[in-house]
Image: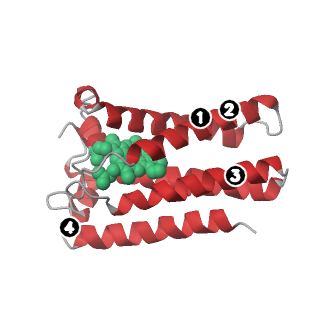
Amino acid sequence: MNLIRDFAIGFGLVAIVIGAALAQAGFFNGFGLGEFVRAFAGEYSRVSLDLAAFARAPLIIQIHAGSALAALGLGLVQLFAPKGTIPHRTLGYVWLGLMLTAALTAIFIRELNNGSFSFIHIFVPLTLLGIVGIIMSARAKRTAKHRGDALGLFFGALVVPGLFAFMPGRLMWQMLFGG
Ligand code: HEM
C-alpha cells in the first residue's frame, strides 16, 4: 500500500496542472507560463548568475532554499548509494531533517499570495505526511514500500516545489538569470 507515494504523485500532478492554469490566466502577473516557456526556449537563454540575490533575501528564505537545495543533493546520494547500511540510515535522518526544515520554514514565507498561503503551501502537509510514512516503512523494514515512499517524497515533495521555485520572478530565477 503506497498511499503516501500515490498522494505525493497525485498532489504533485494536480499542483502542476493548477499552477499552469493559474499562470495561463495571468494569475502571477508579470511572470506567467508563457514567459517561462519562452525564457527556456531561448529568449533569455543567456544565464547570468546573480548569487548576491540570495544574500539579499530574508533569512527565513535563505534557510528554506538552503535546506531544500541540500536535500536535493543529499537525496540523490541516498537514492543511488548502497542501502541497508548505517550511513544510509544516518544520512536518511539528516535528509529528513533538511526536508522538515524546508517544510516548516515554508509556512512563514508568504510572498506569492499577498501574505496568505499560496497553492505551493499544499506541499507542507504533504511533506510532513511523507516524512511520517517513510520513517514507518523503514522501521517496519518494508523495503518495497520504503522505496516507494522515498521516491514519492523526493519527486512529489521536493523536485516539484523545487521546479516552482525556478519560475520567472522568483528568487531562484533571479539567481540564475539575474532579473
Ligand atoms: C530545491 C527545492 C526548493 C527550492 C530551491 C526552493 C526555493 C524557494 C524560495 C527561494 C522561496 C521564496 C522566495 C521566492 O518565492 O522566490 C520559496 C518559497 C516557498 N517554498 Fe520553496 N524551495 C524548494 C523546495 C520546497 C519544498 C520542499 C517545499 C514544501 C515542503 C516548498 C514550499 C515553499 C512555499 C510554500 C513557499 C512560499 C510560497 C509563497 O510565497 O506563497 N519549497 N521556495
The image quadrant of residue 152 is: bottom right
Q: Nearer the viewer, residue 111 or 6?
A: 111
Cβ–Cβ under 8 Å for marks 3 and 4: no
Indicate yes or no: mark 2 CB to ligand 1 under 8 Å. no
Indicate yes or no: mark 3 CB to ligand 1 under 8 Å. no
Q: Callout 4, which amino acid? A: Phe
The image quadrant of residue 5 is: bottom right
Identify the residue under disc 3. Answer: 134
Q: Nearer the viewer, residue 74 or 114?
A: 114
Locate the N terminus by quadrant. Answer: bottom right
| Local crowd size for mark 1, using a 10 Å CA cut-off: few (<14), some (14–19), many (≥20) | some
Q: Residue at x 41, y 66 (%)?
A: 16
Residue 74: which numbered mark, if any? 1
Q: How far apart are labels 1 and 3 at the CA level?
A: 16 Å
Cβ–Cβ under 8 Å for marks 1 and 3: no
Q: Earlier in the sequence, mark 1 or mark 2?
A: 1
Residue 27: which numbered mark, if any? 4
Q: How far apart are labels 3 and 4 at the CA level?
A: 35 Å
Cβ–Cβ under 8 Å for marks 1 and 2: yes
